[in-house]
Image (cartoon, grey):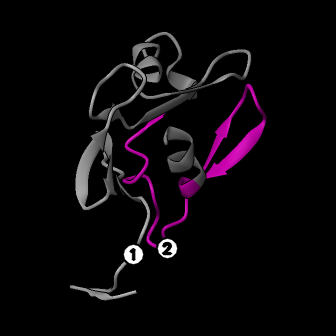
Amino acid sequence: MGLGRYGPAVSGTILGIDPGTTNSAVAAMEGGKPTMVTNAEGQRTTPSVGAYTKNGDRLAGQIAKRQALVNPENTFFSHKVMRDENGNVKLEFPPTGKQFAAEEISAQVY
């Protein structure tokens, strides 16, 4: 293992995630070549939106954004901004009866 510019060289695939407030993106570095990872719709960015349907199914990205007008109470977005001064937030979703921390909401988008 040699030394890279910032420390030990890493082998294998490296993923980078940009959890944007509006859109999120994922890139992969494999064999020294960076590539943007596309989502199921072939796009390089995905709306940072998640939702639960009335029956409790989880949605993320564009499909969650599309249903936001008919299901606003169970749709979450701008979750990075909803943190308190300690970085904590709990969101409750009636269909599931569960509460989620901000990092759990972020994980559901990705």
- Res 10 label: 1
Query: Residue 65 appears at what percent x and percent y?
Result: 40, 22
In the image, residue 81 sits, relative to residue 95, either above or below, namely below
Residue furthest top as drawn: 70
Query: Residue 7 appears at what percent x and percent y?
Result: 32, 89
Residue 75 visible in rendering: no
Residue furthest right as drawn: 97
Please report the bounds of the magenta region as a residue range.
75-103
Residue 30 location, quadrant: bottom left
Mark 2 neighbour density, 10 Å: few (under 14) some (14–19) many (20 or more):
few
109 and 2: which is toward the camera: 2
Q: Which residue is mark 2?
A: 86
Query: Residue 9 appears at what percent x and percent y?
Result: 34, 81
108 and 52: which is toward the camera: 108
Please tell me which residue is depicted at 37% across the width and 19% down the height of the picture.
41
63 and 100: which is toward the camera: 63
Is residue 91 rendered magenta in the image? yes
